[in-house]
Image (tube, grey):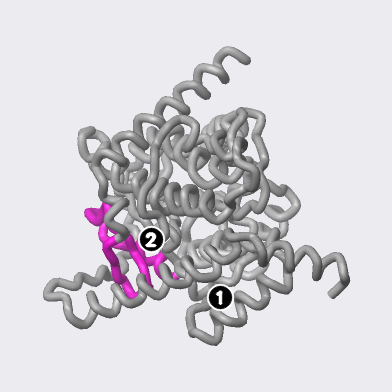
């Protein structure tokens, strides 16, 4: 380790956000497993969901195989679940930022699975323009490939842990945009294709146990866009991750999951669309690539000693549980694998917060739609 790297690590350790990650997040994880233990062994009604593989009816023979879109598919959980579902016979659509990484994953899957059907699209979830371009390209590809213009499965997996404030072209915080606003906009844009499926379709939002670290939150346009963080002297990256991967992929993505579940239930044509949250726990991926390597290695070492660290191949268990849960399953939170579900934090069921978040997110979505129309 060089002097420069050591100095950077020491400065990072002096940051309160580091200790929030190291202590509060670990407590949240242990609490999740403790709740799961209590529910499994002492709850009167501890429901386990068996995996039911998708079936294609004769009326939907043109679909041939269910089509699955996976974001953040170039490494870690995204790559592992892509391989697993390709092996099960899904048409896999990989969505990621790096074309080189996407091409590599496509080649690896096709080399290992002879009859794998894999297609890759470049998309930056922090950019509405990129998300809209992806949707249009996807629709055109479906038409050109003579495939039914529908989607059977959308897995919102992409997420980043940025340690500094970065602003997008749309004047939003990059981590909030990638972890929450992007998946929200993508799901809204692809919902018509999910509704057009001849078999029950599903949205799986990959969330994080870190949502349990959030005890309260304020929902405004500034907090959802992350613009409020630009006013702070130092970037509270641990808080932002909780508010994006947890507020989004857990308090935002959990709130979003539960509200989308309610919204699609109100629309007759959407009754076949289910929405589920899946929490893989702690998985060894490159999510901590911006944290000094000596600290991330130490964190993984400690988590491994505690028996809490999983490989991506094991971590996808809860995601596959969510994918293969019976079609009528919706609005639940999978955690711990083996078909087990768990109640998320009390805050994630706050109806007023859910409504405020949905309204604020929908307003951002509408503004971006109008802005894109003005530029075309």
Q: Nearer the viewer, residue 22 or 348?
A: 22
Residue beneath label 1, please?
A: 311
Residue depth check, mark 2 versus mark 1: number of the one nearer the observer: 2
Image point (61%, 28%), residue name: 170
Residue beneath label 2, please?
A: 212
Position of residue 342 in the picture relative to residue 16 (left or right): left
Q: CA distance from mark 2 to mark 1?
A: 23 Å
- Given contact means CB atoms under 8 Å apart, are the residues at marks 2 and 1 in contact? no
Residues rendered magenta in the picture: 317-343
Q: Residue 200: horizontal and vertical position, in percent?
A: 30, 48
Q: Residue 364: horizontal and vertical position, in percent?
A: 47, 27
**Residue 15 painted magenta:** no
Q: Is 143 situated above or below 324?
A: above
Image point (80%, 66%), residue name: 7
Q: Nearer the viewer, residue 323 or 220?
A: 220
Position of residue 218 in the picture relative to residue 41 (left or right): right
Image point (34%, 54%), residue name: 276
Q: Residue 161: horizontal and vertical position, in percent?
A: 60, 55
Q: Secondary structure at mark 1?
A: loop
Residue 362's quadrant in the figure? top left
Q: Is 370 situated above or below 210?
A: above
Q: Is 285 situated above or below 269?
A: below
Position of residue 189 in the picture relative to residue 283 (left or right): left
């Amino acid at each position: 380790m060089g002097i420069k790297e050591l100095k950077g690590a020491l400065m990072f350790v002096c940051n309160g956000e580091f200790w929030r990650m190291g202590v509060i997040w670990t407590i949240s994880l242990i609490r999740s497993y403790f709740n799961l233990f209590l529910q499994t062994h002492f709850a009167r009604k501890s429901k386990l969901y068996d995996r039911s593989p998708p079936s294609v009816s004769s009326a939907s023979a043109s679909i041939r195989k269910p089509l699955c879109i996976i974001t953040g598919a170039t490494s870690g959980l995204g790559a592992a679940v892509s391989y697993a579902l390709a092996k099960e016979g899904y048409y896999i659509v990989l969505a990621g930022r790096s074309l080189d990484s996407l091409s590599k994953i496509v080649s690896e899957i096709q080399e290992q699975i002879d009859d794998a059907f894999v297609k890759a699209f470049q998309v930056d979830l922090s950019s509405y323009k990129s998300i809209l371009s992806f949707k249009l390209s996807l629709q055109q590809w479906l038409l050109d490939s003579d495939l039914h213009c529908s989607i059977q499965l959308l897995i919102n997996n992409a997420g980043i842990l940025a340690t500094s404030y970065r602003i997008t072209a749309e004047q939003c915080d990059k981590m909030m945009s990638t972890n929450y606003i992007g998946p929200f906009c993508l799901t809204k844009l692809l919902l018509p294709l999910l509704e057009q499926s001849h078999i029950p379709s599903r949205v799986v939002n990959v969330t994080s146990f870190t949502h349990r670290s959030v005890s309260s939150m304020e929902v405004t346009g500034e907090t959802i866009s992350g613009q409020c963080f630009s006013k702070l002297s130092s970037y509270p990256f641990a808080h932002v991750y909780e508010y994006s991967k947890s507020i989004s992929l857990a308090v935002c993505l959990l709130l979003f999951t539960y509200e989308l579940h309610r919204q699609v239930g109100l629309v007759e044509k959407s009754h076949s669309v289910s929405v589920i949250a899946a929490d893989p726990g702690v998985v060894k991926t490159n999510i901590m690539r911006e944290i000094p390597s000596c600290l991330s290695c130490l964190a993984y070492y400690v988590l491994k000693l505690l028996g809490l660290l999983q490989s991506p191949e094991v971590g996808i268990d809860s995601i596959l549980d969510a994918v293969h849960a019976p079609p009528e399953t919706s609005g639940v939170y999978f955690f711990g694998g083996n078909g087990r579900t768990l109640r998320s934090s009390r805050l994630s069921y706050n109806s007023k917060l859910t409504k405020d978040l949905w309204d604020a997110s929908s307003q951002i979505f509408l503004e971006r739609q109008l802005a894109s129309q003005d530029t075309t």
